[in-house]
Image (cartoon, rainbow, N blue to C red):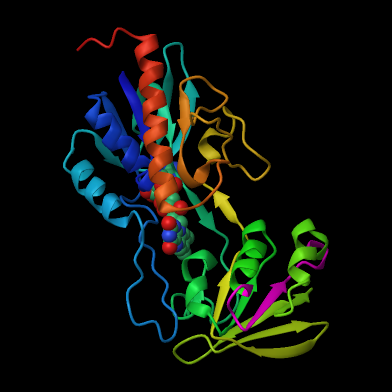
Amino acid sequence: MRELIIIGGGAAALSAGMYALGKQIDFVMIYETLGGKAGWRQSLTGQEEVEYLAGEEAVRIFERKIAMQTDRTIRDTVTTVQRTDQGFRVETRNHEVLEALAVIVATGATPVRLQAPGAHELLGQGLGYSVTTHAHLLAGKTAAVIGATHRALRGVAELARTAEKVYLIIPDPDAASLPMMHAISQRPNVEILSGYTVDEVAGPMNVEEIIVSRNGQQQRIPVDAAFVDLGLRPCSEFVRHLVRTDQEGFIWVDERMATTVPGIFAAGDVTTSFGEQVLIAIGDGARAALSAYDYLLMRTPMTR
Ligand SMILES: Cc1cc2nc3c(=O)[nH]c(=O)nc-3n(C[C@H](O)[C@H](O)[C@H](O)COP(=O)(O)OP(=O)(O)OC[C@H]3O[C@@H](n4cnc5c(N)ncnc54)[C@H](O)[C@@H]3O)c2cc1C
């Protein structure tokens, strides 16, 4: 029986791992990929420099230090977490069974992909999934945002501050009644295309046009960049039977990153906490590890 199992290998899990190392907690980290999504890059046409990603250096340092802990790391996929008399049992796809007094879930969330010709090929070539990363590069230019999530609408508002023109393409016409939509529709440089589906993302090397249609009528929209935000899917399936989540499966956490089950903590994009950013995930991970440490201190003599 270990003291702590950390599930995930991204910014949040690595930061929790660094904290656990510092506190000499007997932990193991189970991850599919080390580093997670920190450092995913998507460039735009005319972008000269590689974008600075705040927090990336820290993640790379954590990654190297954690990778050296060969007796504390397992590359595998967690399939279920169960409660036991003592703590928790964690099972993996490769039939590992591990037990621990506490668990930190830091498995992130996956963006829903745009399924349209060109969307895969032009990913990172003017087609991106993170408005907030690139909004400042679109001053005086034309951009499209595809989707009607809160993040998509927020992204349109951010782009509209400096871009010449922003198209909001909403496949689901019912989404046009979302509360934030009213504020967006008041911006003079925003055009909302509601009920339009994306037929193609076009351009030989970089995105140059978004081809959309409604009721069989096709329209070509020239753009400098396009962003997709059709939602995020939290990687929380293996723990949803235990902890409270919201409707989409994001794990509910309090300000200490504690879930509704004592001994299970969560951090980063998989949680309901606000802001999908590397720096936020790093902070979340450290806070989850600190809370897990407090939990262990109150619960066990922690003798070696
Ligand atoms: C396209 C894109 C661009 C972005 N740009 C920026 C940016 O410019 N600036 C910024 O700050 N943020 C950006 N972000 C957001 C940032 O990448 C995330 O907020 C951050 O990486 C979240 O860290 P995390 O540890 O919570 O999750 P992740 O990085 O997603 O890590 C999750 C980890 O859990 C592992 N995992 C998942 N399921 C299991 C399982 N069942 N068993 C074991 N392991 C599992 C994965 O392998 C991975 O290691 C961007 C995100 C995307 C998608």
Q: Position of residue 92 (x, y in %)?
A: 39, 36
Q: Residue at x 41, y 17 (%)?
A: 295
Q: Residue furthest top?
A: 301
Looking at the picture, does residue 261 appear above or below residue 6? above
Q: Is residue 140 visible?
A: yes
Specify whether residue 221 is painted magenta: no
x, y percent for residue 27: 28, 28
Depicted 85 relative to depicted 110: above or below: above
Q: Is residue 220 left or right of residue 73?
A: right
* Quadrant for the N terminus in the image: top left
- Magenta segment boundaries in residue numbering: 160-175
Based on the displayed image, in which of its 4 quarters is residue 289 positioned?
Answer: top left
Residue at horizontal 69%, vertical 74%? 168
Residue 286 coordinates in the image, percent (x, y): 37, 35
Nearest the camera: 22 or 82? 22
Query: Is residue 77 in view?
Result: no
**Which image quadrant for residue 14?**
top left
Image vertical order of residue 299 relative to residue 45, above or below? above
Of 283 and 120, the residue lying toward us: 283
- The quadrant of the picture occupied by the C terminus is top left
Q: Position of residue 81 (x, y in %)?
A: 47, 29
Residue under the image location 49 percent in, 31 percent down: 257
Q: Which residue is found at the position 60% from the left and 67% from the top?
A: 158
Q: Nearer the viewer, residue 291 or 82?
A: 291
Viewer-proximal residue among 87 and 168:
168
Q: Quadrant of residue 117?
A: bottom right
Is 173 inside the magenta-drawn segment? yes
Taking the image as shown, residue 275 lies to the left or right of residue 76, namely right
Exactly how many numbered labels are in the figure? 0
